[in-house]
Amino acid sequence: MTRLSKRSFVQLAGWGSLAALAVLSGCSKEEKTTTTTAPAGTTTTTTTTATTTMAAASAPAAAAAPAAAASGPLKIAFAYVGPVGDGGWTFAHDNARKAVEKHFGAKVQTSFVENVPEAADAERVFRDMASQGNKLIFGTTFGYMEPMLKVAGDTPDVKFEHATGYKQAPNMRTYDSRTYEGAYMAGVIAGGMTKTNTLGVVGSVPIPEVVRNINSFTMGAQSVNPKVKTKVVWVNKWFDPPNETAAAQSLINGGADVLMQNTDSSAVLQTAGKAGKYAFGWDSDMTAYAPNAHLASAIINWVPYYVNAVQDALDGTWKGGGHTWWGVKEGAIDIVSISDKVPADIKTKVEGVKAGLKDGSFVIWKGPITSNDGKEMLAAGTNADDKFMSGINFFVKGVEGKVPGGDKK
Amino acid sequence: MDQFALLVAATLNSGTVLAFAALGLLINERAGVVNLGAEGIMLVAAIAGFATAVHTGSDTLAFAAGAVAGAMLAAVFGVLVIWLNTNQYATGLALSLFGAGFSAFVGIRYTQEKLGEQHTFHIPVLGDIPFVGPALFRQHPLVYVAIGLTIAIAWFLYRSRAGLVLRAVGESPESAHALGYPVRRIRLAALVVGGALCGIAGVYVSVVYTHLWVEGMTAGKGWIALALTTFATWRPARVLLGAYLFGGVTMLQLQLQGEGVQVSSQFLTMLPYLATILVLVLISRNASFIRANMPASIGKPFFPG
């Protein structure tokens, strides 16, 4: 009997430590989301306003809304899909958040939650943000579209900003940046640097945005070197460093000597560095990861848009339902840290493209544009409109292969 | 021809990660313990190794740190499942989740760190032979260690007395116990060695293969290694073969995409899994062979009398 009870006690201890282990592992994730949310100094005041405004929203009287605005700084929350330290996409968003704080000082109070999955969890995070009194909420990945739309419908006094999506509501609008302009400028450099006339792109997921970037990259290269062809390898993920490495290696094996990627890590750049080839930084400046291989970084600067959106909200001129798509012209896209290895005439050419995009005299997607199976997609002399741009599912001449699933539409 | 040489080289490189992890798991399972925590162990070792490499600049120390981290986690797992008789599968799953969360947590400040320029390896004379040189003799030393290790483990399991005892513990712990062998300590030792090997595999991913740290970066390699040991019917040479096969088909499908082959990339992404399972199932389709090789007491707890 004693032996048995001793054994069951030991077993209990085992299960207990197992549970502790599980809880601990849960905690380490949870901790990240909670510790990085807003400093809790003003919780009491903000929660009271939040409850009053939410009550007001359901009741016809709307008097509580201006009262909330007058009660303190504008509370702004950001939901990120990755960690702020990813060195790429989320990093760029968080830099813009910091810039907003600096620009507006005491008028705003920002907070963020990182690693918010593109799933049901996102809805809970958005509801939390709204109930904590945030009046302006940014969601920075495509997958937040439905959850944001749902929460926006329930909290009409909160303004929602959704990156890269296409669904809007009276209190929700969308924004994006013209990453393909950066890809084009990188292409110009790639065209000037390749010796084998073969470029390689590691693609993430075959959606129009990525296909557009691959095409623009190729068109940029062809503008200085008509013989260039581009090989594409898909990894079917945004973020998978071992596979990105393998994909980059296979492109190098196939003869590509300048690489580009539309994935979220610096793995491709580092692989190029190891093999003595060239590559680019994407989304953020990645020079430091492989100084010898790095030719330039095509970066996204969210600051102009975020400052603008916050200003709108502060002025009361914020209107939902629209879509903003900014590029070089508005300072949202740039190519930076161009390597000394790039010859001067190519640098001049890049500066020329940048200046042309800025004053509107240069258009990247201008006909004639032919797909790589010989069909004319855009007639000579016409400029592609944003609708055409957002539905690109073909490769231009010079890109090898076919867009996966591209023939379905 | 050069293309093919490079493909072989890339295959050996990417297969090595799986080979280390799967050989480690093979030792565990030969002793009768299934460690589903491999993925978590690999991740923790990957960050431990990466952090060490960042601070010391030494790859050797990085691998040592990763192996120690892997061994320690495996030891904790061992104490839980061997002495406290917790369920091996549930504990393994918990370890895997814990490892993923814990490595992400401690790794936050390392996500943007970078390692120094990487050395290229080149065996003198042999590395200069046309075709064979670039294909086989310009690899990271651990690639050759993996091959040596496979031979060593095969010899240990089938030719040494200690290996016989280890297999006995996995087949029938009661008999081994009756003969006076310390079953629990032998299982723990097997787990620690297996954990260290999984740890080396994790460090290989972060320090040698991709050269960076990001959370969840092993991307399921631990699970593939687990499947591999089973499909390879717990035979070391087959484990190595399966690892290279998986690595090879992964590289081949990427290369085919690069050549513009008109097959959907989603199908090609699936190919390594399909090919590996198919080949290993085909070579192990003999049911009595599987029975002969499968540790009879795998996954079962052992209560000494």
Image: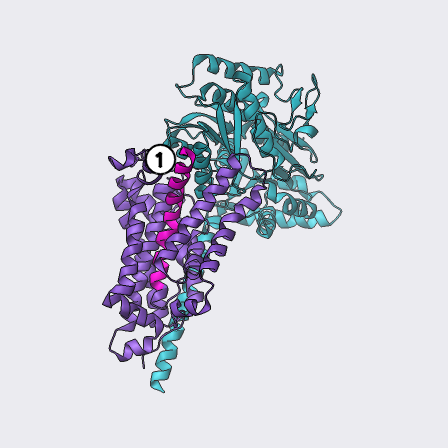
Chain colours: A cyan, B purple
Task: Give the residues in magenta.
Answer: B1-28
* Quadrant of the image containing the N terminus of chain A: bottom left
Q: Residues within 10 Å of mark 1 (few under 14, many from 20)?
A: some
Residue A69 coordinates in the image, percent (x, y) = 62, 38
Whether residue A94 appears in magenta in the rendering, the answer is no
Residue A306 position (above or below residue B289)? above
Question: Which amino acid lies under the numbered mark 1 shown in the image of this protein?
Answer: Phe
Tell me how many marks there are: 1
Residue closest to the eye, A305 or B57: B57
Disc 1 designates what residue? B131
Residue closest to the eye, A223 or A74: A223
* Quadrant of the image containing the C terminus of chain A: top right
Residue A125 coordinates in the image, percent (x, y) = 57, 49
**Residue at the farthest bottom position:** A1
Residue closest to the eye, B137 or B177: B137
Residue A379 position (above or below residue A263)? above
Q: Is residue B15 visible?
A: yes
Q: Give left or right: position of A37 versus B205.
A: right
**Residue at the farthest right position:** A60
The quarter holding residue B284 reads: bottom left
Of all chains, the one bearing label 1 is B
Residue B104 coordinates in the image, percent (x, y) = 42, 49
Q: Main secondary structure of the magenta part?
A: helix
Q: Give left or right: position of B180 versus A33.
A: left
